[in-house]
Image (tube, rainbow, N blue to C red):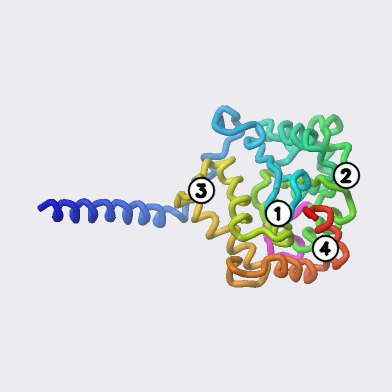
Amino acid sequence: MKNMKKIILFIFILLIAQADAADFNFNKKDFYRSLSSRLSKDRNNYIYLSDEEFANFRAVTSTGIKAGKLYRSSSPVKAWGNRNKIADSAAREAGVRTFINLADEYKNLKSYKDFSETYYSAQKIICLNLNLKFESKKFQAGIARAVNFMANNPAPYLIHCDLGKDRCGIVCAVIESLMGASSDEIVKDYMISFYNYFGIKPGSAEYEFVADNEIRPFLASIFGVKTIENINLPAAATQYLLKIGVESKDIEALKINLGTY
C-alpha cells in the first residue's frame, strides 16, 4: 500500500511538471510580448537590484579579459528611467576612456539633454547606428569598425546600445569568444541583462528558453557553425572578424589591449 501511494505521488508530481512545461511551450509565442509588460523605467520596480544593475552596467571579465579593461551598459546618454545618469557615473568611476555606441548616429548625441555636461561627452566615442539584423552587411561592417576603433584607442572600453542587451550582447559575445571565453561564460554574461530587466533567473525555464533562442543560435549563425558548444571559439571569432574585413593587426592589437598577458 505504501509503495502504491509513493507511485501515485510520483505520477502526480510528474503530471504537474509536464503540465508546467506544456503551459510554457504553449505560451512561448507570446513570451517576448509579455516581457514588455515587465520592463519598467521606475527604479522602485527594481528594488532587488543595485544602481549599477538597474543601469545594466557591469565589467566583462570572462576568460582572457583583464579586469578593468571592458565594460557594458545601457546608454549613458539616452534618458530612460535615469539609467543613463547611473551608467555615466559608473563609467566615470571605472575610468572608461573609449565608448562604443552601437545605437546612435553622431548627430543624435547633442540632442540628448545635458549631453555636454556628461563624463561621456569628453571621451573618445564611435557611433555605429547598428540594426538588429546580426548577419546583415551593416551589422558586420559595424563590428569591424568597432574592433578597429578599440584596437586604436585606449582601454578601458564601454560598449552600449540602448538597453545594453541585444546589439551590445552580440558584440560582447564576439569579443569574449576571441579572448578565450567558454560558451558557458558567454551565455551567463548575455543572460545577466535578462535578469536586470525582466527578473529572469538562472535555471528557470525562461532563462533556458532565451539562451536557446538567442545567444546560442545567434552566435553560432554568425560564426557559421551548428553550435557554439565544444568548438574553438577564439578561432571561430578570428575567422569571422577576418571575413568581415578586420585586419589581423587590429585583431592582435585588440587582444593586447584587453588581454591578461
What's under tag 4, amino acid-wise?
A: Ile
Residue at the spot of label 3: 202
Q: Which mark is residue 172?
A: 1
Residue 115 is tagged as: none
Q: Is residue 75 left or right of residue 197?
A: right
Q: Which disc number belongs to residue 251?
A: 4
Q: Residue furthest front?
A: 261
**Left or right side of 207 for 220:** right
**Quick one: label 3 or label 2, which is nearer the N terminus?**
2
Q: Is the C-beta separation of discs 3 and 1 under 8 Å? A: no
- Circle 2 is placed at which residue position? 124
Task: State the image quarter where residue 45 is shown.
Answer: top right
Check if mark 1's residue and mark 2's residue have beta carbons within 8 Å: no
Ranked by sequence position, the earlier of labels 4 and 2 is: 2
In this picture, which residue range is highlighted in magenta?
129-139
Using the numbered discs, state the Cα–Cα distance from disc 3 to disc 1 in whole angstroms. Answer: 20 Å
Local packing at callout 2 (Cα closer than 10 Å; few below 14, some 14-19, many 20+) is some
Q: Name the residue furthest left.
A: 1
